Amino acid sequence: MSMTKLANVLWMRELQKQVDAVGAAITCMSINPGKVNTFASRMPFPLIASILFAIFFEVSEVGAYTSCFAAASPAVRASPQKYKGTFLEPVGVITEPSDNAKNEELAKELWDTTESVLTSVGGKSDGGIDLLGWWWLPQLDASHINAPRRRLRVLAQCKAEKKKIGPKFVRELEGVLHRYLTLSPSSHSFDPRNSDIPTISEAKPQYPLVAIFISESPFTRSTLLRAQSSPVPLFLLHLPPVPLRSNSLSDGDNDNQDEWVGSAVWNPALAGVRGLLGGEFEICWERSLTGCGRPGLWWHNQKLNNWNPEMDGSIQIEDLHLTHEDLLLEELAEETA
């Protein structure tokens, strides 16, 4: 029995214990479909391989018999206690698994490890939102950089994938933003010139939303195309890991300095003339002499420095809290758990 099959059997046996503990009328079984030909079509000469393998292996339809038996057999329904936590071989025959597969301590350890991984990596409590913050930007059509600023709510996801980021991540972020909007007590708007939208129950203003995706690995071309066509205001930020300073200027690394430079891309729904920023802003990658750098935001050819209203006392930190948002995020986390 391979490691993956052993893990399947162990996890199933512990699952049966868990559902029994809460009194659920559920029967859990693991199965061995038998020797099934699922690979002849991938051989160099598939037709010849299929003829030869037919002597020793069953076709896939026959391999599904035991799965169908476990899922729909009247025998299982009539005697659920007999089949609980069992290992079935073709067709529907209860068989004793290996000693390792019957190890209850090993099964519990696998279950606990699975729970631990899902809790720490799966984002059970964040609802798909890793960072929440604000952008404080000049009002659209403002005459100077020191004019009163408006605020935009920023929702961000962060990823440290080894491979390039594919378009599915953009779709997931779109889904998170739409769920956030759906659960919100008011209807947020993507209209760039309508930043004060009252809630249904209260007159407090709500604020436009921006979705940011931050990644250690670059984005594929299809990801960028997906983001550009999205109706959601999106900002894709590639921040590659920076080498240690002691090695950053070594002769061997000089040729690879371009790999340290990230990228910052936003879509028309955010930065276009008809987008949230009204076409008045630019994003630039500001490269330093060491080859590293950071993204910078520019407004009418003027660099926007870091600013928030606490700096001049125009707003208190408690005033940044959005009404009902804590409950909204809890609902979002429950929905995505």
Image: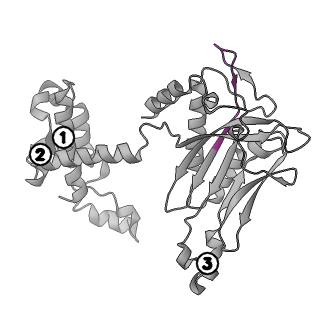
Q: Is any part of residue 90 visible from this angle?
A: no
Looking at the rendered structure, the secondary structure element under dot 3 is helix
Task: State the quadrant of the N terminus.
Answer: bottom left
For this orientation, the residue located farthest to the front is 313
Q: Main secondary structure of the magenta part?
A: loop
Position of 78 relative to 120 (above/below): above
Quarter holding residue 123: top left
Position of 112 relative to 81 (above/below): below
Dot 1 or dot 2: first in sequence order is 1
Q: Which mark is residue 109?
A: none
- Please state the horizontal and vertical placement of residue 211, each as a whole percent of the image: 64, 42
**Mark 2 neighbour density, 10 Å: few (under 14) some (14–19) many (20 or more):** some
Looking at the rendered structure, the secondary structure element under dot 1 is helix
Q: What scheme was used to colour the molecule?
A: one colour
Dot 2 corresponds to which residue? 104
Foreground disc of the pair 1, 3: 3
- Please state the horizontal and vertical placement of residue 20, each as a whole percent of the image: 17, 29
Q: What's the amino acid at mark 3?
A: Asn
Span of residues in magenta: 199-211
